[in-house]
Amino acid sequence: MFQDDQQFWFETLRNLGLAVYGGSDVGEVVATASQVTSGDYDGWHDAWLSTAKRLEADAHASHPVSARDGLLRASTYYRAAGEGPKPTLVMHNGFNCAAEELHFFGAVSGQERGYHVLTFDGPGQPAAIHRDGLVFRPDCENVVGPVLDFLAQHARTCPASSRPRSAWSRPPTRLGR
């Protein structure tokens, strides 16, 4: 299966690996992947979406335990189809850590678990100070706030029900306001 398509093979293996803890079912994964031709991204999307929708419908008509199990698997297949918004993990580095280092300190783990990940250098940190000349500033809410505002404007990554909120007492503001 997918001998000439590393991406589809990787995603299929990824879905198979979730079976251990109920995130997928081996038979469902094999049956769904078998419907897809290498390189056919529309076919990939349609096959996984169809499986996810079928499982979700079955789950709603099932015993609560069966419904839980079916919905968990359906969520995997919706993800495989590329459907729906994903939660977003915002990672901000410390004093002299570069945003790129966050790749190793959680960004990869977040991505592997289905999150979008946004890392950034704030003022005084490597890219910001070297590229843009931005120095440290004490009002961090005016740095993080615009980042959260940016995420809030992108509904595919952050649905209205879980829009990010600033950790500070006042709402996020844009730089320059």
Image (cartoon, rainbow, N blue to C red):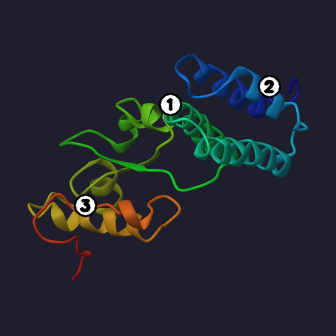
Q: Closer to the observer: label 1 or label 3?
A: 1
Horizontally, residue 28 falls left or right of residue 169, namely right
> Judging from the image, what secondary structure is the residue with disc 1 in?
helix
Can you give x and y, in whole percent of width and height, for residue 134 in the image?
24, 62
Q: Earlier in the sequence, mark 2 or mark 1?
A: 2
Q: Which residue is mark 2?
A: 30
Residue at the disc numbered 3: 144
Q: Percent from the top left, x then y, of residue 31?
A: 82, 29
* Residue with the mark numbered 1: 65
Q: Position of residue 170 (x, y in %)?
A: 13, 71
Tell me the element at label 3: helix
Amino acid of disc 3: Val
Q: Nearer the viewer, mark 2 or mark 3?
A: 2
Q: Is residue 85 above or below residue 43?
A: below
Q: Is residue 156 above or below residue 26?
A: below
Report the residue that reaches farthest toward the right: 37
Residue at mark 2 to residue at mark 3: CA–CA distance: 43 Å
Sequence-first tag of 2 and 3:
2
* Above or below for 73 versus 115: above
Q: CA distance from mark 2 to mark 1?
A: 24 Å
Residues at circles 1 and 3 in contact by the CB criterion of under 8 Å:
no
